[in-house]
Image (cartoon, helix red, strand yellow):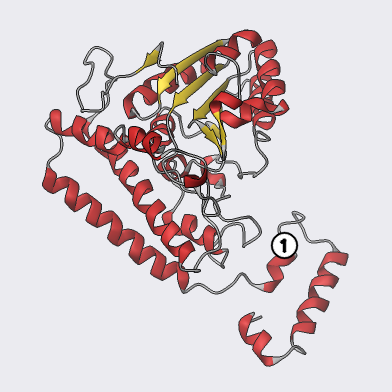
Amino acid sequence: MVEADLLRIIEPDGSFDAKAEPKLSEAVLKDGYRHLVLVRALDARMLSLQRQGRIGFYVPSTGEEALQVGSAMALTKDDWIFPAYREPGCALWRGFPLDRFIAQCYGNALDLSKGRQMPSHYAYRPSNYVTISSPVGTQIPPAVGAAWAAKIRGDPIVTIVYFGDGATSEGDFHAGMNFAGVFKTPTVFFCKNNQWAISVPLARQTASRTLAEKARAYGFEGVRVDGNDLLAVYAATKAAVDKARGGGGPTMIEALTYRIGPHSSSDDPTRYRPKEEVEHWQARDPLERMRRYLHRKGLASKEWDEALRKELEDLITETVQRVEKAPPPPLETLFTDVYAEMPPHVREQMEAFLASGERRRPEIVDRFPL
């Protein structure tokens, strides 16, 4: 792990560099912390639901909350987000409803994708939050393409694309970086360097001193930031977004962080990571860092923090209980969202399929009501 040239504003103990501190209101700072706590509590609850067999799969992001929320805070409502599968804080900050987030893991009638996508692979069109794809790095070329299209149209938007350190070994990363550099697209490449691509450590991923320096080969700036520092992430992303929107071209941000928990609910990180490494990064917890910062500035108290955590735990409990009562998606949704207007041959197939359901066994009909 190289910490040279690493932008940091808040230290792990909550002390901070007042000269580098971005000018954010008390309300924004406290809302940022609220979202950190929400993502952490949501992760714990969703993993618990998966272990109980109530959902099938979940991708946690414990330890990476600050880079998600801090980067999202720097965007405007019209900017486009091309996520990987570990950015719930970004989605929630951008207005993705909590009940729809949870419903996506159940795949029931409240799920906007109607159960067609894997859990933790959500999208939200009102926030320009593009659907998540499992293959590593495939979101990078579309993010560059969308930025190039916006530049051609004269649309003053920026695209931000999130990916892990493992994605920097994929061809899509290099193709996207090269095109963005040549055509100076308004793209922010946000690399979440959490040290591990499932069980492959960073040392086996690249021979470069840092990941950010790869941007120089493609003709644009690469910067490094402490990914566990909400304010530093915000400042670095805001600078990159402003530069891109002003015609200055792309920037690659390498956010140094750590995945405290498993890669997914199907992973056992104790098989490939030393306990001491995890403990080292737990001492750099982004939630604790932001809490201590707010306390030092006199913006939060122990009582306020405890009340906030209880409020969010109760909110998640109530939302889960409500979402679990939703039925499966209606059977006719198998045929919708394929065409803007359903053509006759698809409608004929749908009607035949729905009619066949009336002749099925009663227990099947009860399970999948028409």
Position of residue 22 relative to residue 314, above or below, is: above
Which residue is depicted at the point 61% across and 45% down?
131
The answer to whether 334 appears left or right of 254 in the picture is right
Q: Residues within 10 Å of mark 1 (few under 14, many from 20)?
A: some
Residue 160 in the image, given as x and y percentages of width and height = 55, 28
Task: Give the quadrant of the C terminus.
Answer: bottom right
Q: Is residue 82 visible?
A: no
Q: Is residue 34 visible?
A: yes
Position of residue 53 relative to residue 311, above or below, is: below
Task: Give the quadrant of the N terminus.
Answer: top left
Q: Nearer the viewer, residue 75 or 68?
A: 68
The answer to whether 234 appears left or right of 158 in the picture is left
Label 1 sits on residue = 336
Residue 41 in the image, given as x and y percentages of width and height = 34, 52
Residue 75 in the image, given as x and y percentages of width and height = 45, 29
* Residue type marked 1: Thr
Q: Is disc 1 placed on a helix, strand or loop?
A: loop
Which residue is depicted at the point 31% across and 59% down?
315
Q: Quadrant of residue 345?
A: bottom right
- Judged from this view, the residue extending furthest toward the bottom is 362
Q: Quadrant of residue 30?
A: top left
Q: Nearer the viewer, residue 4 or 45?
A: 4
Position of residue 83 relative to residue 51, above or below, is: above
Total count of labels: 1
The answer to whether 326 appears left or right of 328 in the picture is left
Residue 339 in the image, given as x and y percentages of width and height = 77, 55
Q: Nearer the viewer, residue 363 or 150?
A: 363
